Each structure stands twice: as C-alpha cells, then as structure tokens.
Amino acid sequence: RDRNRIEMFELREIRSVPTLMHWHIEILNEVFGVKPRPRLLVAVRRYYREHITDGSHLAFVAEENGVDCGYGSVCFTEEVPSPGNQTGRCACITNIYVKQLYQNRGIEVLILRRLLQEAYDRKCGKISFEITY
C-alpha cells in the first residue's frame, strides 16, 4: 500500500543556490515561523556556495507530476576516527520537510531513504538526525 504511494514521487538532487535558498526560507517560515533577516540569508547563501561545490552538503527535492512537494538534505563532516566510527566520516540528516498538501503520503520516507543511502555510500560511521518540530 505505502510502496505504491511512494513510487508516485521522484527525487532529484538540487545544486542551484537560488533553489536551495527558496527551500531554506520556506522551511524557516513554515516550520519555525521565522522570517529570516538579511544577515542570516547572506550566511546561508555563502554556506551553500561552499558546501554544495565541495560535496559536503547534498539536497534533494521530491516531486510529483513536476510539482515540488518535499525537501531534505545531508551534511558530511569528519571527526577523529574511533572504535565506534573507524572511518571518521559523519553525516547529519537535516531539514526533511514536506509541504502540507503532500504530508502523510510517504514522501518523508522516500527522502530519508535517499539521504541514508548517500551516507552509507560515503561509508559514514556516524549518522545523526536534526529533528525540529
């Protein structure tokens, strides 16, 4: 049942800074109820330019019939290797967001699976989640 619903959506990686900014602002507005100040937007834009380019930040949009309906991202870092994380590679999954009209249709699961796969493919020994309400 859920599998059929999930298959209706497609994911695409986004690398366009204006598109990333659009989603970031929407998340700040819809999830946090915050209208970001210009100084924050400058810092966010700088972050995306640097980390999308170097591959340490990946973002994906879910779409249905050409309509963007959900978003999620993962940030990659390194720490000192340890017995619990021998590669030292870390992933933080963040900003999974689905527009209200599309919620409870399995899009969150689709996005999360893709972000986890990216972390596994990079052999991250530690995966964390940023959860916001």
Image: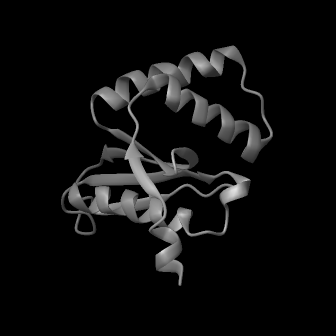
| Front residue (pair 117, 83) | 117
Tell whether 26 sits left or right of 6: right
Residue sitting at the far right: 33
The quarter holding residue 101 reads bottom right
Classify the position of the C terminus by image quarter. Answer: bottom right
Residue at image location 53% in from the left, 79% down from the top: 2
Residue 109 in the image: x percent, y percent?
50, 68
Q: How many marks?
A: 0
Residue at image location 40% in from the left, 22% down from the top: 49
Residue sitting at the far front: 65
The quarter holding residue 75 reads top left
Residue 64 in the image: x percent, y percent?
53, 53
Tell whether 70 sits left or right of 34: left
Residue at image location 31% in from the left, 62% down from the top: 117
Residue 84 in the image: x percent, y percent?
28, 69
- Whether 93 is drawn above or below 28: the answer is below
| Front residue (pair 64, 55) | 64
Is residue 133 among what the camera can see?
Answer: no
